[in-house]
Amino acid sequence: MIPSKYKANEVEDKWYQYWMKNNYFHSTPDEREPYTIVIPPPNVTGVLHMGHMLNNTIQDVLIRRARLLGKNACWVPGTDHASIATEAKVVAKLKEQGISKSDLTREEFLQHAFDWKDEYGGIILEQLKKLGASCDWERTAFTMDPEMSESVIKVFVDLYNKGLIYRGYRMVNWDPEAKTTLSDEEVIHEERQGNLYYLEYKIEGSEDTLTIATTRPETIFGDTAICINPNDERFTHLKGKKAIVPLCGRVIPIIEDEYVDLEFGTGCLKVTPAHDENDKNLGDKHQLEVIDIFNDDASLNSFGLHYQGKDRFVVRKEIAKELEDKDILVKTEVHTNKVGTSERTKAVIEPRLSDQWFLKMEELAKPAIKAVLGDNTEINLYPKKFENTYRHWMENVRDWNISRQLWWGQQIPAFFYGDGKEDFVVAETREKAYELAVSSGAVEKSFKIEDLRQDEDALDTWFSSWLWPMSVFDGIRNPENEEIKYYYPTNDLVTGPDILFFWVARMIVAGYEYKDEKPFQNVYLTGLVRDKQRRKMSKSLGNSPDALKLIDDYGADGVRVGLLLSSAAGNDLMFDEDLCKQGKGFANKIWNAFRLIKGWEVDATLEQPETAKIGLVWYEAKFQKTLAEIEDHFSKYRLSDALMAIYKLIMDDFSSWLLEIVKPAYQQPIDKKTFDAIIVVLENNLKVLHPFMPFLTEEIWQYIADRTPEEALIIAKYPVVKFNIEGIDSITQLATFSRMQEIVSGIRTIRKDKNIAFKDTIELFEINKTERSIYYNPIIQKLCNVSDIVEISEKVEGASFRVKSNEYFVPISEEDIDVEAEIVKLEGELKRAQGFLFGITKKLSNERFVANAPEQVITLERKKESDTLSKIETIKNSLASLK
């Protein structure tokens, strides 16, 4: 028995288990064409949110379609260790247990982190299964898996040996909450309103003073100079003198440099080399002392005197009050400036001098720029508008700070054998490092391996995930293995534009460096999921719906359709739960159509009616036209448009028209030829819909007939586009059917307006001015219960309507006609037709348009003009007869 209602909750788990049991998702190299996607690995800390839902639905659509096309589809899942986010969560959990990270050894902490990962790390992948994601779960990878870590370390050593990785004492972005450095790309610059504080500094040995303006009065403890512009006549008297730093009384030189902006602030600049990159450059140039006043949590250290131990923002308020009380603060102005914040923790970034590891990017970036932006591009971005963003980042690329002051991550393979900054060797293991240190003569033979001290820092998470398309196939450790040769380069990458540089660009760089080849062919960049008010969805705003609850309420297929119907590539998605409701409604419509078909009694002795024969020929032409449109949309990564084309095909053409054309009379059987043809049509519809709605389609497919696992829909053969259907003039078929639909619509409107029951047979009279084909007359008669369609030359009394220039009449007794209403209707039609004619006439009277437009366009416009004139004449005659 086929259930009366489609119950997604009961169906989805059943078919997912069936697919898993029969190993449809698993891929191994064979003779078929490979189609490969690697998942953008979500953070191991994560749970499914709307962005994941959209991104992974798109990937699943692509992978399921490839499977139907007969390709060897391989979708590699996995998670990212997300060093900053995960370490913060583990530290917080330990704190709840009364354990401090500082009380643990690195090994002990990592054991806690792996325990946490084992407990929570697979949640998001399990949730993806609820969505229907057909990943090859046997290939699930984690960026801290031993073989993945080995690949990362191997690449670090290789790049170091090539002279591309170096250790430098630089000004870096310090996240005082995560207590680690960040790369420039991990810093978000936000406009914030603050204050500009004007402070008075005394000049040593005189009563003179100078005033400086600063947004950060707490940093005066790190001042090591005052700088003036040598061309500024206002300060000629200060040249060669010294100033006294307020509160701490330290004497600092007054230096001259044209770097100082004459127009900004007071023209005097305080120089704090430890806490501003530009000040550091000035300090290096003028050989200034460097005084770091902050601890790693951005509280002040002993240089902060009586403010030691207090947070920088607390000190800012308190020091401003103290400076004001001591008449050092001259005035305060409201000032807006850009403040760097951590992408992960949202903490305000502190510029800090530190020994860090850097990767030289300029040369590495060149092949990656050429691959996307060159004359013979190898990688396509969809939509193309993101090429400008890619160009800006890559042509202005800076050296990548790849070290992080964390334990959760791959530990940097640098081993120190002495106290000097350069006393280290780089090698993949401690044993290899020891051999290298001894063989190079850096240490005596009596030096013990235990005396080597490995750098405490871990590598940036992105330094692991930039190898993802290669490392998941073991292409770094074993570059000639069968899998990397077969699956690489991958086909499509689906991700968000927010990590176009962090991840996408860096994967391209790594691909060309280690495989001398692109890592993927196409990059599909999704938009952000926003709410109806265009706000980005977030936990803090409380506007992000529970992804699993949506699946519970609307079914996975309903949610997938809801997401994709409003998701054009690269444009933000305005998510509305009603779209999921629409998706659920679509599923119910298909289910009811299927139940209708299966409810028909089949009689093998019946002849096929002409109406069914005509309808099936038309639908074949319509299906092929739509199939070609779908192919075009997929080729341009317009998945939303592809789904909408299928939606209209099934909702309108199949359900509203074809089924109505072929269905038997009430309680009458259907002929076998038509029934079998409708089943084929239904199966083809299910095939094109399956990538978008996998559960519903598999359920119906398996109900249609008893299927073996080899006959499951998930691996069925996708319909092939036939540009020429034997014996069918598709263009004419579709054009004449469209006209027939307008006639049917006109008759149905009359029946509705005049309250004529469908069981009452009517006649239809036609003034056929455009020689309309009568091919579809049998269908008009069936769908509208028309006894006869009679061609006439003069009007007859009754209700009327027009299609093109033809006029149609349904005889009705005069007492049934509301003359006044009919006149109002005709006058409205006349006004619209005259307005349309005005637009065409204006266009055709434009000499420039006529001179430049293609001949076929002019011909089409003149035909529109002719048809509209004919229509206006018909309406006027109808009005005259009524008046």
Image (tube, helix red, strand yellow):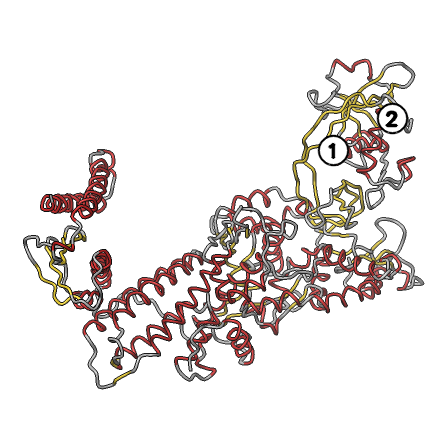
> Which residue has dot 1 on it?
278
Question: Of helix, strand and loop, which one carries label 1?
Answer: helix
**Foreground pick, 575 / 811:** 811
Q: Is residue 447 above or below residue 370?
A: below
- Residue 311, quarter of picture: top right
Quadrant in the picture for the C terminus: top left
* Residue 28: percent from left, percent from top: 55, 75
Q: Amino acid at mark 1?
A: Asn
> Which residue has dot 2 on it?
245
Question: Of helix, strand and loop, which one carries label 2?
Answer: loop
Q: Is residue 39 above or below residue 228?
A: below
- Residue 312, quarter of picture: top right
Q: Residue at x 76, y 40 (%)?
A: 351
> Mark on residue 23?
none
* Residue 825: percent from left, percent from top: 21, 46
**Foreground pick, 692 / 724:** 692
* Label 2 CA crowd tier, 10 Å (few <14, some 14–19, many 20+): many
